[in-house]
């Protein structure tokens, strides 16, 4: 609980006009994220700039209360949850595009701008900001930076990290620093920019972001290929890339997802463009896009068609117009709602394996599903080996929940054995904290903790995230509690 | 000086057979880099793996001697110089390619492999490792990682940092850790990989590198355009990129460089392909390459030709065959030797400005040259605003040297005013250490030092580099000494 004095001081910093919330009803709105877990903060503030955030952090160090930065609260790992209460710093008010520089292909933005809104703005100028987390219509650039968000286009264009040239950051102790440059190159001192990207709001609060842009591709072609053997689909992915084509999207949908989506979309879609009427034995779908020069993608899509058909695709569809593009994406877009029909609750994991290990990963996950009598549906970004593993459960069934927890651990074990990683784009936050030592050695975790502790000696910034720390006992308890409630 | 006991212990670790050097004649070979400064180490060792390096670092912490990692010693900022003596760890023996994975487009290599050799190997398999520092025929991947090396192709393909997926690193205290992943995505914990890249061997010794590869472009086209007004050349660069073409090379050569190169190449080259016969008033040359799909680059080079001629190019040449490609590159390649003809010594700076500020930077540098009565020749990577500023002096002329030092500081000031950075790809090392605070704030430097100190509490790993530290007084003295001798 924060004292009245602290609340008064916070109000002095951010100003009265709805820039601080303390009533329970208001706080509830800032207590959760996409993990569906809830932790009530003691206050929510809406600062307007780095200076105000600096003052809040200095006060937090002095008074010893936790501070948790928050974008849109759409994260999948609990990065923005105030697990130990304290002050949530919402970046909502800091949502301006400060500069779009078409000559130098850069933009300077505040963290609170919604990623999709920024994309729309730069595209008006013929420019392109490629990272496209599925949440892009509501998630913010600040949140994307904190979690190093990816998305379907990462296979060709990389992730958020690859577009962050520099930052303005308020360090946990309140100092405001600038990292990186507005230029494409720069090697002056340590790369604090990339250290901040993906640090899940634990090393600093980002208040300004310098982004790299690229020219907007001239055109896009969308294709869909249906395979009766998932291994053929996976092989096709490798063969496309070996043919020197890097598609801008290379999405993969497994049998269980196809089944769900088919059931879900069973209503009135024209046969020729919906995914209805798929071969009954469809084992995998690839949704493929190429973008760039008009003539080139014409040629590339022809090559992709040939590769798909040569490698066992039972069906291949190429969208002829925008309407057909939308139809082809329908299957991919329908996955989330259709999975919900299958079972009320979903444990959504985010593993990555080397691209050619996808069949082993899917087969392994299917074996684990069988062993624990669970329904697991997989889809994801086949181009970069990033698979979203969805364990469909009913959380009120405690036995099923327990089996699911065991399955998660086995899936992570399998992933690491295949040379992969337990999180491709969602981060660790609180939901993967118990598993981080499956992937990282004690010495690596220790090095990270040392960096955390030296930059945040009082442990006030977003405590209880990523790893358990001896120094932040209070935070740990919150995190443990969080974990114990994770799927409840 | 190292005690005989330490030498004996080191020998026990690395083994006798020429894996340790201690005689003065041998040490001299490891005392310098491309800055032409010399600092004699006390011993040079050639470990074969991370375990041996770990033992050496543990001993260094216990005994308190400096350890300096070294690749090929081709750095331009002194990163590999043993400014306080101690043990040089040469990574020469660790030069193997451990894996090239054509399916997943990755390679795992040891740090000592020469970058050009690695490139040749992967190209045999139709793969591509794009970063191309001019030193690639002798510099090593480990050195490239330590300095985050760039090169002409960075405009399209990015720098070393963009290709490092993961590392095996021996931390200053001797722990061996793995960072990152073999997959394209990964967000588990802090990004220690990118923190290590560009840390100039001060945060750890890299012993294994997981690199991202891409498919080898099908073809390349090389062009050269001559401008009588440098501003037209700069504008052309922006216009090419606005036309959605990102050339794989976009090199810029200024008037002084052209003059030097013309004088240097004055002997017997056929007029039509050499750069002899350039317009007398040539103010800038652009050397442009596009790569990728054969048909696409045909189209792109036609567009580039049109843009060049529309924007004041007095001459435009497109190489018809490999021989002509070589001829067009001749001017660019002749810069370094021809500059040496101009004056015996060169202060080689490495600034970056936003792409469209290149004319302001060049004009500003020319003004500074006039003010201090110096000859300054500029060339560089126009696509990413990276200009190599070459102040041509005779170091025996103390007055000229003093003027040059003043000019350097003014050039850095101008660079920062234009929104740029004082080092694009050479690093800070010792040669730019006195200037780092022109670009970084005290709080940013403090954050970096905190990270350095917490990972290297005894200050034994590559001390006296990047920034002055209160805790490493001995190192500072070395660095100051180094600086004072920098251009001598």
Image (cartoon, coloured by chain):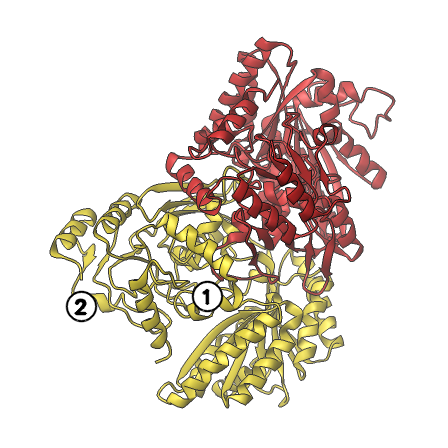
Chain colours: A yellow, B red
Disc 2 on helix, strand or loop?
helix
| Residue A317 in view here | yes
Q: Are marks 2 and 1 on the same chain?
A: yes
Q: What is the x, y in percent for residue A477?
A: 31, 68
- According to the picture, the residue beneath numbered tag 1 turns out to be A426
Q: Residues within 10 Å of mark 1 (few under 14, many from 20)?
A: many
Q: Check the residue under mark 2 and report the chain it is in.
A: A
In the depicted structure, whether residue B186 falls above or below residue A52: below
In this rendered view, identify the residue nearer to me: B76 or A267: B76
Q: Check the residue under mark 1 and report the chain it is in.
A: A
| Residue B158 in view here | no
Q: Quadrant of residue A158?
A: bottom right
In this rendered view, identify the residue nearer to me: B18 or A23: B18
Q: Quadrant of residue B177?
A: bottom right
Horizontal relation, residue B413 to residue A234: left or right = left
Q: Tell me which numbered mark, 2 or 1, is placed earlier along the sequence.
A: 2
Give the quadrant of the N terminus of chain A: bottom left
Q: What is the x, y in percent for residue B55?
A: 60, 50
Q: Quadrant of residue B275?
A: top right
Horizontal relation, residue A102 to residue B277: left or right = left
- According to the picture, the residue beneath numbered tag 2 turns out to be A24
Q: What is the x, y in percent for residue B422?
A: 52, 31
In the depicted structure, whether residue B113 falls above or below residue B464: below
Measure the C-alpha gap from mark 2 to mark 1.
29 Å
In this rendered view, identify the residue nearer to me: A469 or B65: B65
Disc 1 on helix, strand or loop?
loop
Do the residues bearing badges 2 and 1 touch, measured as CB atoms within 8 Å?
A: no
Give the quadrant of the C terminus of chain A: bottom left
Q: What is the x, y in percent for residue A17?
A: 17, 53
């Amino acid at each position: 609980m924060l004292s009245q004095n602290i609340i008064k001081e916070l109000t002095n910093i951010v100003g009265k006009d709805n820039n601080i919330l303390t009533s329970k009803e208001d706080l509830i709105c800032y207590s959760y994220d996409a993990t569906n877990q809830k932790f009530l903060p003691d206050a929510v503030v809406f600062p307007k700039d780095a200076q105000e955030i600096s003052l809040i952090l200095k006060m937090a160090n002095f008074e010893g209360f936790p501070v948790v930065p928050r974008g849109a609260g759409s994260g999948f790992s609990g990065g923005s949850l105030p697990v130990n209460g304290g002050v949530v710093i919402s970046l909502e008010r800091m949502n301006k595009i400060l500069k779009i520089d078409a000559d130098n292909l850069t933009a300077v933005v505040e963290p609170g701008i919604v990623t999709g809104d920024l994309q729309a703005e730069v595209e008006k100028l013929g420019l392109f900001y490629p990272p496209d987390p599925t949440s892009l219509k509501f998630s913010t650039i600040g949140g994307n930076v904190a979690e190093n968000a990816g998305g379907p286009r990462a296979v060709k264009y990389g992730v958020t990290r690859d577009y962050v040239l520099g930052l303005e950051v308020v360090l946990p102790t309140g100092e405001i620093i600038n990292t990186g440059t507005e230029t494409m190159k720069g090697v002056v001192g340590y790369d604090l920019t990339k250290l901040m990207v993906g640090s899940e709001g634990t090393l600093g609060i980002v208040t300004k972001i310098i982004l790299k842009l690229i020219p907007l591709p001239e055109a896009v072609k969308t294709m869909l290929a249906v395979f009766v053997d998932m291994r053929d689909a996976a092989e096709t992915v490798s063969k496309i890339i070996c043919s020197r084509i890097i598609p801008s999207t290379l999405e993969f949908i497994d049998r269980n997802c196809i089944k769900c989506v088919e059931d879900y979309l069973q209503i009135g879609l024209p046969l020729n463009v919906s995914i209805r009427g798929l071969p009954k034995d469809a084992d995998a779908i690839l949704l493929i896009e190429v973008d760039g020069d008009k003539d080139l993608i014409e040629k590339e899509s022809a090559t992709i068609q040939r590769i798909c058909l040569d490698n066992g695709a039972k069906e291949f569809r190429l969208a002829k117009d925008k309407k057909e593009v939308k139809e082809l994406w329908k299957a991919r877009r329908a996955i989330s709602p259709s999975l919900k029909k299958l079972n009320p609750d979903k444990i959504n994991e985010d593993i990555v394996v080397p691209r050619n290990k996808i069949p082993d990963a899917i087969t392994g996950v299917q074996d684990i599903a069988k062993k624990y009598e669970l329904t697991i549906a997989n889809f994801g970004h086949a181009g970069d080996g990033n698979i979203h593993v969805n364990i469909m459960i009913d959380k009120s069934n405690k036995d099923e929940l327990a089996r699911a927890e065991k399955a998660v651990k086995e899936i992570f074990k399998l992933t690491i054995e295949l040379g992969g990683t337990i999180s491709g784009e969602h981060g660790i936050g609180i939901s993967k904290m118990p598993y981080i030592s499956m992937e990282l050695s004690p010495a690596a975790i220790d090095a990270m903790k040392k960096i955390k502790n030296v930059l945040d000696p009082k442990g006030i910034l977003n405590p209880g995230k990523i790893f358990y720390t001896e120094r932040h006992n209070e935070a740990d308890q919150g995190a443990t509690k969080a974990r114990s409630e994770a799927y409840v």
